[in-house]
Amino acid sequence: TLFPYTTLFRSIDASPELLARYSGTDTGFIAQNVYLFCASAGLATVVRGSVDREAFAAALKLESSQQIILAQTVGYPGK
């Protein structure tokens, strides 16, 4: 499972809403690229928004400025 995350930069002169929009857009690009790779490699993938972000952030030792946006599981398709 992949966990695209964002780092919230306080030095950027932007509102929290704009930072969230940028983070969501970048995460969408990442997820789309993973989907395209999986399609070309014969793999399956699914994006999941319902994940325990706090537990996974702790396991990945993310800093407080880094937030998991979603999870994307990759594997072999069912038969």
Image (cartoon, helix red, strand yellow):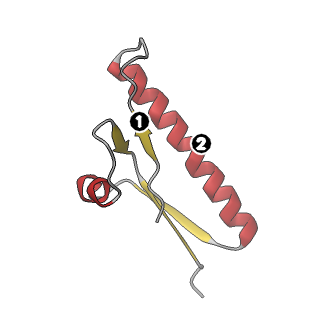
Between 60 and 16, the one nearer to me in the picture: 60
Q: CA distance from mark 1 to mark 2?
A: 16 Å
Q: Which mark is residue 7?
A: 1
Image x and y of residue 4, in percent: 47, 49
> Of callouts 1 and 2, which one flags the residue occurring earlier in the amino acid sequence?
1
Q: Which residue corresponds to the image point at 46% horizontal and 34% vertical from the top-left?
A: 23
Assign a secondary structure to mark 2: helix
From the image, tell me which residue sits under label 2.
Answer: 29
Q: How many marks?
A: 2
Q: Which residue corresponds to the image point at 31% horizontal and 53% vertical from the top-left?
A: 57
Q: Residues within 10 Å of mark 1 (few under 14, many from 20)?
A: some
Q: Which residue corresponds to the image point at 41% horizontal and 24% vertical from the top-left?
A: 19
Determine whether, in the image, residue 61 is placed left or right of residue 43: left
Amino acid beneath label 1: Thr
Determine whether, in the image, residue 10 is placed left or right of residue 34: left
Q: Farthest residue to the bottom: give it.
A: 79
Between 37 and 66, the one nearer to me in the picture: 66
Q: Quadrant of residue 71?
A: bottom left
Image x and y of residue 16, in percent: 33, 21
Which quadrant of the figure contains the C terminus?
bottom right
Q: Which residue corresponds to the image point at 69% horizontal and 60% vertical from the top-left?
A: 37
Residue 76 sits above or below residue 57 on the image: below
Residue 46 sits above or below residue 19 on the image: below
Residue 42 sits above or below residue 21 on the image: below
Q: Residues within 10 Å of mark 2 (few under 14, many from 20)?
A: few
Between 70 and 62, the one nearer to me in the picture: 62
